[in-house]
């Protein structure tokens, strides 16, 4: 996928294209990393590239659960929330990326089955960070919120990635998409024992 969202027609197609583009940008932060690099925490925060992708996957699934009203009765789980930000020693980057791909396909299938993006999505009342004065969002609002959340976390992942090996977004994209080097942009290249994922 190129650096810009393709020109598409229709609100649903545009929203899904922007959602896909943000996912792609987040996935690119993992390009060429080893499992150890993907789980490393090189900044003052506790964030890693693998953990951010894992969190965004869980967050997107949770929103689709809310859209479909298939919420669990246990309410928010603080330990699970924290675990979703952590790439464990047993997990591989490829497993996390494959799960993120499955999540994207699940979301596309769910959204394809909803005729009206204005369909109300009731606000869960057991979540402390959700508003008390709003009864429902729309599916459209949820898609825009997903775009916003993924973009925010892709920015976090960009910073973490740059601390891991100096890789930045467009050189990494150029390497992933095999762009030719040019006077204004050289592709990212692995160093040492890095592999291309």
Image: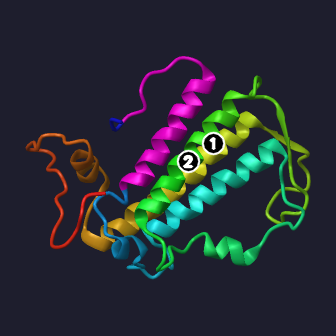
Disc count in the image? 2
Q: Is residue 27 magenta?
A: yes
Is residue 189 found left or right of 141 in the rendered image?
left
Q: Splitting the image into 4 quarters, where does residue 104 fall?
A: top right
Percent x, y of residue 40: 40, 78
Q: Which residue is mark 1?
A: 106
Q: Nearer the viewer, residue 163 or 51?
A: 51
- Spatial CA span between label 1 and label 2: 6 Å
Q: Nearer the viewer, residue 101 or 19?
A: 101
Q: Tell me if label 1 and label 2 are in contact, CB under 8 Å.
A: yes
Report the residue at 37% width, 71% height from top.
35
Q: Which residues are magenta?
A: 4-28
Percent x, y of residue 113: 72, 28
The figure's colour scheme reads rainbow
How crowded pointer 2 is (Cα within 10 Å; few <14, some 14-19, many 20+) is rated as few
Magenta span: helix, strand or loop, mainly? Answer: helix
């Amino acid at each position: 996928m190129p650096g810009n969202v393709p020109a598409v027609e229709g609100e649903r197609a545009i929203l899904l294209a922007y959602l896909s583009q943000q996912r792609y940008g987040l996935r690119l932060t993992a390009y060429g990393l080893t499992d150890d690099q993907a789980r490393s925490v090189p900044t003052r925060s506790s964030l890693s590239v693998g953990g951010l992708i894992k969190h965004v996957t869980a967050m997107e699934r949770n929103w689709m659960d809310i859209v479909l009203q298939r919420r669990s009765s246990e309410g928010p789980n603080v330990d699970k929330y924290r675990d979703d930000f952590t790439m464990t020693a047993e997990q591989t980057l490829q497993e996390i990326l494959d799960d993120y791909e499955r999540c994207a396909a699940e979301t596309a299938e769910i959204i394809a089955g909803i005729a009206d993006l204005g369909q109300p999505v009731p606000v869960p009342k057991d979540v402390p960070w959700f508003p008390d004065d709003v009864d429902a969002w729309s599916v459209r609002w949820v898609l825009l919120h997903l775009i916003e959340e993924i973009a925010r976390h892709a920015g976090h992942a960009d910073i973490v990635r740059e601390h891991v090996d100096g890789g930045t977004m467009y050189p990494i994209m150029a390497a992933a998409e095999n762009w030719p080097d040019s006077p204004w942009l050289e592709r990212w290249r692995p160093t040492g024992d890095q592999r291309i994922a």
